[in-house]
Image (cartoon, coloured by chain):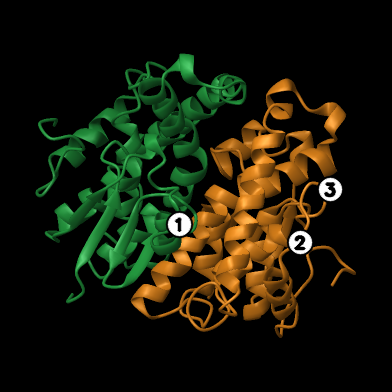
Chain colours: A orange, B green
Amino acid sequence: MTDPLILHEDPISGNCYKIRLTASLLGISLERRTYDIRNGETRSPEFLRSINANGRIPVLQIGDRFLPESNAACYWLAEGSDLIPSDRFDHAEMLRWLFFEQYSHEPNIATLRFWLAYIGKDNLDDTQLGQINSKTRSGQEALRVMDAHLVQRDWFAGTGLSIADIALFAYTHVAEEGAIFSLDDHPAICRWMARISDEPGFVPMKPGDH
Amino acid sequence: MTDPLILHEDPISGNCYKIRLTASLLGISLERRTYDIRNGETRSPEFLRSINANGRIPVLQIGDRFLPESNAACYWLAEGSDLIPSDRFDHAEMLRWLFFEQYSHEPNIATLRFWLAYIGKDNLDDTQLGQINSKTRSGQEALRVMDAHLVQRDWFAGTGLSIADIALFAYTHVAEEGAIFSLDDHPAICRWMARISDEPGFVPMKPGDH
């Protein structure tokens, strides 16, 4: 890899952490440029023009090319490594869990964490307040599905750690921030999180955490 | 491929259509088993136990294995074909648009179509009604991002048709059902949809349409 790699990120974002964790597990160095999403720094005309027209982070910059979407960036970093299963079905099952993460997990668990632990309930608008109950139910359902899957296996896809585990770990391990979700009833998830934390090269989301 | 392929689907679902379109473009035969999502047929104990614990369709059955998530199923079908770019960056960019489709496009454009054209506004609950405006804005933004990307290129990733185009086509081409979204202001999207319809092996979502 000769192109310099720059991660455009906000350190509070689990989506950004996925990419840092993937890089760390692979021994890849990333330069980090931080933005504050709560101050709209990813909606500036400059950001929209040169980094991501969708106004979102993370974006992985590879030389002069820009790759949005956290799970796509993890895949780019991990291609050719053991973090991507080579068997055709296992590979598709890894993708299955990456799409589950973005559709059934992140919009519920990550969004409620952001609203309640970072924005604050008093600052939410009526549209957001009206979704708390439905997002709580959907997030609990996502955790139930994950726990049931992990009862009989150590990893989400294939026979070892893959980027599906990394992607799901990012917001699951901070799911209790915001005081909506509890992992106490999901022992298989807790054991799986411990396995990930024990991986060589693991880095915590926040400095000092483990 | 020796395993029989069975698509568990609802014909009104664009997510199911993606898989049928991918298979048709590749000349692959699928057996179809249909369920009515409006009658809760994918939430039955039998479905949850044997097809998908997440209670969703589509599920692609490959022999005795089950693969949920439409975009993962498209990838499994298309692996090794021209519908998956081989260049590392182009491949990651294809994944980027697949994740964009599931995060920024489908939950807005497909959900409003389902609510307004299939469930009916009078049958929506307060949580759903409260989200119509925000989903309208987010869906319009997704169409704007797509159109801007297509102004300077024929396909979403790489140099030819990929499963990213197929995934985004599925709900874009029926986006006007429900009378919320209009494609009139997005000429690059309209030209791209015409290119897809002209592909050898193209099948419409509903019999008789084109």
Which residue is most to the right?
A208
Query: Mark number for residue B48?
Result: 1
Q: Which amino acid does label 3 sit on?
A: Ala
Determine the secondary structure under disc 2. Answer: loop
Q: Is residue A29 visible?
A: no
x, y percentage for residue A20?
68, 66
Q: In which quarter of the image is the C terminus of chain A?
A: bottom right
Chain containing mark 2: A
Chain designation of label 3: A
Circle 2 residue: A183
Q: Please report contact status of discs 2 and 3: CB closer than 8 Å, yes or no.
A: no
Q: Which of marks 3 and 1 is in front?
A: 1
**Residue contact at pointers 3 and 1, CB within 8 angstroms:** no
Q: Which amino acid does label 2 sit on?
A: Leu
Closest to the observer: B154 or B208?
Answer: B208
Label 3 belongs to which residue? Answer: A179
Q: The disc labelled 1 sits on which kind of residue?
A: Leu
Q: Quadrant of residue B4?
A: bottom left
